Amino acid sequence: MRDRGWASGFTALCVGQCLAHQTSLTFSILIPILSSAWSLTSSQAGLILGVFQFGTLGAYAAVGFLLDRIRSKPIMVWSGVLVGIGDLLFAFGAHDFVSGLALRLLVGIMFGGLYLPALKQIAETVPRDRRGSATGIYIAVIVLAYAVPLYYVGLLAPRIGWRTTMAGVGVLELLGALVMAWKVQSIPLPAMLKSLGPSRYVRDVLANRPARRVIVAYTGHNWELFGMWGWLTPFMVAMLVARGSVREDALALGGMLSAGAIGLGGAVGAVAGGRLSDRLGRAETATLMLGLSLLCSTVFGWLFGAPLVLLVGIALLYGVVSLADSPSYSAKLMEVVPPHSLGGAFSLQMLTGWTATALAPLALGIVLDVTQAAGFGPAAQWGWAFSLLALGPLAGLIALVPLRRRYAALNALTQPAGPTDPGT
């Protein structure tokens, strides 16, 4: 299965996961509508964005360990079903901050059963020398699933109502669950897993220095990525309104611009980053992209009043480089952690990484409220908010330095036979 016949199942996995991931950033594009309808502050909107991530984090912490005991496919399928049902409940049951918060938390919990089983499925079915590229393609597909709703929800919600639009999102997610149930392979678990206890995670993950460094870098990556993803659309809408657009037009165009930066930029970044990691090395690729994304976070918000062409160009670059390091972390973890502990390793990675995804949108919202109350102009408000995200790639760069050095040393020792994977 690893060496042949994996492509059709991988394709079905990507299609089903794409449909099931539609809800990811839908609340982000609805912030301009629901802030008015529900009288939300920026901090409350950031809290709803963050609580979705907290729900997903809680699920990740459990699901990863379950993957070392339960097959991947049933978890993915049932999660897709429950996410679709959760969005239908949000569409018809959310009426204010409290109900919206509770229902987005529920959807976030259900959402946590999608991503990790897909990574485990890739590790079990894709040949090792293609995992970086396969992981990059999968992440690119998921990014498109995050980004495309920014456009069609922003376009449809002002015209047919946000409730009807969100109900349609739920139906798409149910369709994704059906695709995965129909076409994704079901891989049996090795019998030896039944005899292994939880103590193996101490040796295989917690005492594994390369694995710990990958997890730290992934956490910094997520701080920046999800803070930017969560607030890019409100930034674009506010920028367009400040330039004279009416709110309805600004919502549609802002969603389209954000979808382009997150979806097109992120998809290109994920595929290119995955391929580059197979050739250049996981740590080397991640380091290069973290450096570029740090620069983007530092300058992006300050461009609020810059020419639109420049702003859109930097946003597209931001979308590319902020995601291009992502395949390196998953592929690297597959290489430095034994297969029988990989699910638990993914859980520990997500436990820290998704804590960052929950805190970053809230932190950015708080900065916006504080700077606005202090009388700062829009460029300074958004400039300081996005600059806060640069702390993530900075932490990742520091964590990856020893892995890059080790790779260089091992590579020099093994030439001309070829590069050696760090941490093996």
Image (cartoon, grey):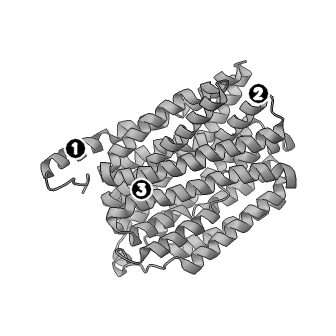
Residue at point 50% right, 67% down?
117
Identify the residue at the far top of this view.
375
Q: Earlier in the sequence, mark 3 or mark 1?
A: 3
Residue at point 52% right, 65% down?
63
Circle 3 is placed at which residue position?
330
Residue 146 drawn at (x, y percent): 62, 53
Q: Amino acid at mark 3?
A: Ser
Residue 119 relative to residue 36: left or right:
left
Circle 2 is placed at which residue position?
243
Q: Which mark is residue 244?
A: none
Helix, strand or loop at mark 3: helix
Residue 80 relative to residue 399: left or right:
right
The reply to whether dot 2 and dot 1 touch (C-beta < 8 Å) is no
Label 2: few (<14), some (14–19) or many (≥20) C-alpha neighbours in 10 Å: few
- In this rendering, the label closer to the viewer, 3 or 1: 1
Q: Where 170 falls versus 26 (above or below)? A: below
Q: Is residue 70 visible?
A: no
Calculate the distance from the C-alpha at mark 2 to the C-alpha at mark 1. Answer: 50 Å
- In this rendering, the label closer to the viewer, 2 or 1: 2
Residue 424 drawn at (x, y percent): 24, 57
Circle 1 is placed at which residue position?
408
Residue 264 relative to residue 397: left or right:
right
Residue at point 54% right, 66% down?
14
